[in-house]
Each structure stands twice: as structure tokens, then as C-alpha cells.
Image: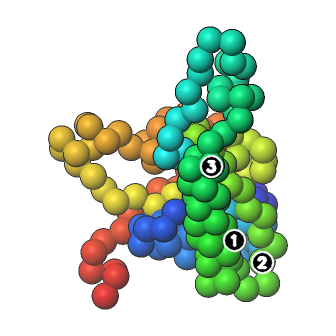
Amino acid sequence: MIKKILIGIDDSKYAEHAAKYGFEIARKFNAAVGLVNIVEPAMPPQVSAGTDPILGTLSQGIGLEEMEIMDIQKNQSENIVDSAIAKFAGDLQVSHFTEYGSKADGIINCGKEFKADLIVLGTHSRSGLDRLLMGSVAEHVVRHSEVPVLVVPFKESESQ
């Protein structure tokens, strides 16, 4: 029984297509929806001698520029989530998560935290060298998730 669906979103047309699909499934099953947007840090924290190995330079204080970048990323993430809720949620119950770090691991961790019965992701169907070099978030989630993962393909003809 599908009672909770986690949908991974970003600002791409692929993720938007998957979100639409995920919300349609949620309506059919009267399931709660969790939206997750993963923010990959623009600048990885630097750890220096004497700093906390977990917090890195956060324990020493973050520079103004880094704080501004983090704020911009947080605001963009919130806008992505708010836009998806406004566009697709209707009367469905929606929880949202903004995570920082690896997209694939963040999605898996949010799925566990949300206790999702299904994870829905979009894909841009990379192939060949591009896929080898870039990796695949969807593939990693499929391989490591403890719950079913629905990967929703997107065809360019669907955007018109």
C-alpha cells in the first residue's frame, strides 16, 4: 500500500514532469507527498588543523560571501519547493525537505526520514560518455533505496 510518496525535485523540466506524475499517483492512492530538493554546496567547507572535523570552518565562522551563497541556495530551494506545491499539490498533504550534500544520498535519507513507500524521480536519460562522467542520481537511488523507486523518463516532445 502506498501511503507516502517522496518526490525529488530541482529546477529542471525533467523533475517537474516527475513531480506532476508523482502527485497524480498520490491522488490515486490518497497518499501524503514529501518533496525534497537537495542543495549541493557551491563551496565545500574547508577543514583545517584545530577545526571541528564535522563542522569544518563552520566552527570557526563562515565568511560573509559563503553565507550569502548559502542564503541564495536556500532561497532557490524554497522557491522550487513552493512552486511545485502551488502547481501540483491541490488539497494533498505535502511535507518538504531541503537537504545539503549529495543528491542521491540526500534523497535516500529523506525517504527514510519521511518513511516513504515510494520514491519518484525524473531522468534526463543521459547516455554514453556523459553518463559515465556525470554519474546518475536516479541510478544510485534505485540501487541503494530500501523502497521502490519510480524513475519517470522525459521526452523532449513532451515539453511542447
Quick check: 87 above or below 38? below
Tell me the distance, in whole angstroms, between the alpha carbons under discs 2 and 3. 39 Å
Amino acid type of the residue that numbered disc 2 sits on in the rendered structure: Leu
Of label 2 and label 1, which has the lower sequence position? 1
Q: Residue at x 56, y 27 (%)?
A: 46
Q: Secondary structure at mark 2?
A: loop
Q: Nearer the viewer, residue 63 or 157?
A: 63
Between marks 1 and 3 in the image, the one whose residue lies nearer the viewer = 3
Q: Which residue is mark 3?
A: 64
Q: Residue at x 39, y 43 (%)?
A: 136
Q: Residue at x 26, y 37 (%)?
A: 133
Task: State yes or no: discs 1 and 3 in contact (Cβ < 8 Å).
Answer: no
Q: Say which quarter of the image contains residue 75.
A: bottom right
Residue 132 position within the rendered picture, expressed as x and y whole percent measured from the top left: 26, 37
Image quarter in which the C terminus is found? bottom left
- Mark 2, other Cα within 10 Å: few <14 / some 14–19 / many ≥20: some
Tell me the distance, in whole angstroms, between the alpha carbons under discs 1 and 3. 42 Å
Q: Nearer the viewer, residue 68 or 115?
A: 68
Of label 2 and label 3, which has the lower sequence position? 3
- Mark 3, other Cα within 10 Å: few <14 / some 14–19 / many ≥20: few
Amino acid type of the residue that numbered disc 1 sits on in the rendered structure: Ala
Residue 152 position within the rendered picture, expressed as x and y whole percent measured from the top left: 45, 63
Q: Secondary structure at mark 1?
A: helix
Q: Which residue is mark 2?
A: 92
Residue 126 position within the rendered picture, expressed as x and y whole percent measured from the top left: 27, 52
Q: Nearer the viewer, residue 160 or 101?
A: 101
Q: Which mark identifies residue 41?
A: none
One can see residue 31 in this view: no
Q: Which residue is mark 1?
A: 26
